[in-house]
Structure formats: C-alpha cells, structure tokens
Amino acid sequence: MAKFKVLKQVDGKKENKRFEPGEEVELTVKRVQEIETNIDKQKKFKGTGPYFERIEEPSE
C-alpha cells in the first residue's frame, strides 16, 4: 500500500467511500490507476485528472 493525497473529490466504489480533497489515503498504486482510468473513460470527466498525488515516505 502507498500513501496518496486526494486532489479532487472522487467516489471509491470498491472502498464504499468518498475521498475528499486534502485527505491522505492508503491505496495500492494499481487501484489508484484503476480509479483514474475509469474516471477518464467518462466523457464529461475526460482529461480532468489527476485525482491523486503520491506522498513519498521520508527516508530515515
């Protein structure tokens, strides 16, 4: 799992959750790609991404 910052409001159907802007979430990279691909398939939302930004964990 990786940490992501939500940039735009998006509904995660599989997660049964609405992700709000500014929220930090843990999702797999594959799931984030799947969400953004599904959004981009809809005509009215095409090209409006990205919806998530990966947060790099500080190295110790």
Image (cartoon, rainbow, N blue to C red):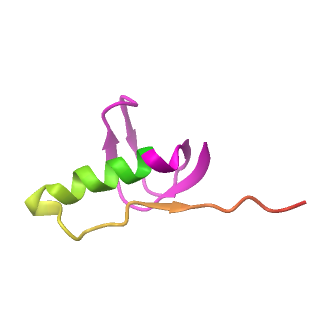
Point out the image quarter for the C terminus. Answer: bottom right
Residue in the foreground of this view, choosing between 39 and 23: 39
Residue in the foreground of this view, choosing between 15 and 32: 32
Residue, far right: 60
Residue 27 within the segment the image draws in magenta: yes
In the image, is residue 35 above or below residue 18?
A: below
Horizontal and vertical percent position of residue 55: 62, 61
Indicate the quadrant where residue 40 lies: bottom left
Residue positioned 52% across, 51% down in the render: 23
Q: What stretch is highlighted in magenta?
A: 1-30
In the image, is residue 57 above or below residue 38?
A: below
Horizontal and vertical percent position of residue 59: 84, 62
Residue, far bottom: 47
Horizontal and vertical percent position of residue 48: 25, 69
Residue positioned 13% across, 55% down in the render: 42
Is 24 positioned to the left or the right of 52 in the image? right
Indicate the quadrant where residue 39 lies: bottom left
Residue 22 within the segment the image draws in magenta: yes
